[in-house]
Amino acid sequence: METTAQVSAKMQKALEVLHQDFSTIRTGKASAALVENINIQAYGGTANLRVLELATIHATDPQTLVIAPFDKTVLNEIEKGISNANVGLNPIVDGEILRINLPPLTEERRREFTKLVAQKAESGKVMIRQIRHEAMEGAKKHAAAESVSEDEVIRSEKEIQRVTDEYIEKIDQLQKDKEKELMTM
């Protein structure tokens, strides 16, 4: 049987995945998270920019991202990878760096991104509920195998539900914060 600390740790990982997923949604402000997970073909393999550590990525202002490759020979591969990723970013080769100018978000685009945030939040809640389901099943199996009292099983299930509710609230708060960020930029 999993302890509530183990269940909480799994839910925390799911929350971190969601948080990272949210960071890839453009809010009108330049951020390295917009491109660091894009897959690039370089040196005979494919991996994302962050894993390959091919370049530094930084925002020079709220509307501009600059990607400076360590090895200038992969500049075109990085450009192709970003262009082919269909994330709405158009990199421009500027000497030995790439510039990505982010146009301001229209009201319609902000609403689309808000819907996307809601979908991703719901997916996060599904992950949390799946972890809860597995933990509850584990508690029942443990009770049957170890002849644990029914009161103990009920107490364990209530504790798992309490942790679940806590993480669902955290997801709701993350969603509200991201939506607010989208609508105020």
Image (tube, rainbow, N blue to C red):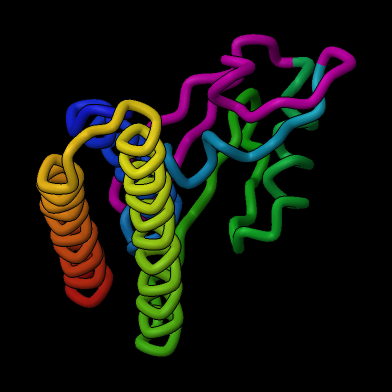
> Can you name the residue that lies furthest to the right here?
44
**Residue sitting at 41 percent across and 38 percent down?**
141
> Can you name the residue that lies furthest to the bottom here?
108
Q: What is the quadrant of the N terminus in the image?
A: top left
Quarter of the rendering containing residue 47? top right
Q: Nearer the viewer, residue 159 or 33?
A: 159
Residue 81, x across and y down, in percent: 74, 40
Tell me, yes or no, whether the highlighted magenta stretch contains residue 51. Answer: yes
> Can you name the residue that lies furthest to the front here?
147
Residue 139, x across and y down, in percent: 31, 39
**Residue sitting at 13 percent across and 40 percent down?**
152
Q: Is residue 9 left or right of residue 165?
A: right
Q: Is residue 54 left or right of residue 182?
A: right
Q: What is the quadrant of the C terminus in the image?
A: bottom left
Residue 77, x across and y down, in percent: 79, 31
**Residue sitting at 35 percent across and 64 percent down?**
121
